[in-house]
Amino acid sequence: MNHAVSTGTDALTTDTTTATQDATGGLTRIAPGGIERRACRRTRVHGDAMIAFRSTAGEEHTRKVEFLDASVSGIGIRSEKPVRIGTEFALFPDKVRQSSWTGSVVRCVQDGDGWTIGLQLAEAA
């Protein structure tokens, strides 16, 4: 069973999300109950990035992460460590024309020996 990290009552405590891939390689993640949480289509993304998380106390922590998927409004990444939901971030992709994205963490679920993190972008990509 996967466990979420949260500071609020609106976050998931367990996750039974499944994913399916369509014929064009797009990734659709289905939440418990069969409802897609993201309004925009996801596309599988490969590559690495550096991310800076800013805590509510103003402390910054950086780490290397791996891209999983992306949509117009959000990005899925994989990290070795969890991060609290609501934490602000700045993401700096290694090989993408966009210099950086900002937003907040909306999901953090343990996935094997790492964490799947959902990032909501401050501005649509």
Image (spheres, rainbow, N blue to C red):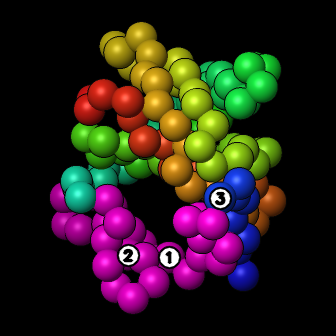
Residue that badge 2 annotates: 30
Residue that badge 1 annotates: 17
- Give the Cα separation between the discs numbered 1 and 2: 6 Å
Q: Nearer the viewer, mark 2 or mark 3?
A: 3
Q: Position of residue 8 (x, y in %)?
A: 65, 58
User: Which of 17 and 20 lies nearest the eye of the viewer?
Assistant: 17
Residue that badge 3 annotates: 8
Q: Position of residue 124 (x, y in %)?
A: 26, 32
Which element type, helix, strand or loop, lies under badge 3?
loop
Residue type at numbered disc 2: Ile
| Quarter of the image with the C terminus in it | top left
User: Which of 76 and 58 lies nearest the eye of the viewer?
Assistant: 58
| Quarter of the image with the N terminus in it | bottom right
Q: Position of residue 5 (x, y in %)?
A: 72, 59
Quarter assignment of residue 50 = top right
Residue 30 lies in the magenta stretch: yes
